[in-house]
Amino acid sequence: MTLPETGNMIVRAADWTRAERPDEFLRSLVDDPAGYRTMLSKVPPGPLGDMHAHDTIEQIYVIDGDFYDDDASYGPGDFVLRMPGTQHRAGSRNGCTMLLVYAPLVTK
């Protein structure tokens, strides 16, 4: 769903879709051509993935379970913000559900 030009946007519950990794699922909430993306992610237990970076700001809010990267481990209620170009890899020891928000960096 793209961003509305004005007013509100409501996203009703939808089915989860398979992601790239086995047993990983996504529920897309916003997928706008301007680079704004919001989704829920169910991550299975597994090791650190491949090193990568995003060209947008990445925001992660852990809803349940555990999530980790090369810097720290995170649990329910933890919030991680990564600026564009930040190299990272991530995994989960026991699986987790998290809210992911990607937004372009707006410069003045």
Image: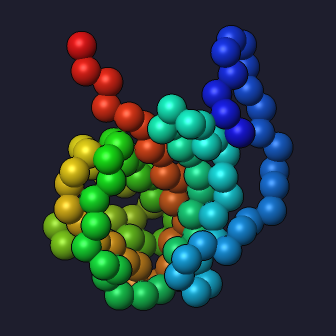
Q: Is residue 101 visible?
A: yes
Q: Position of residue 64 (x, y in %)?
A: 52, 65
Q: Residue at x 67, y 15 (%)?
A: 5
Left/right of residue 81 with respect to residue 42 in the rendered view: left
Q: Position of residue 102 (x, y in %)?
A: 44, 44
Q: Position of residue 81 (x, y in %)?
A: 30, 46
Q: Is residue 81 visible?
A: no
- Work out whether 20 lies above or below 57: below
In front: 67, or 35? 35
Left/right of residue 52 with respect to residue 93 in the rendered view: left
Q: Residue at x 77, y 39 (%)?
A: 11
Residue 92: which quarter of the image?
Answer: bottom left
Left/right of residue 83 with respect to residue 43 in the rendered view: left
- What's the colour scheme? rainbow
In front: 60, or 75? 60
Q: Residue at x 47, y 86 (%)?
A: 45
Image quadrant where one finds the C terminus:
top left
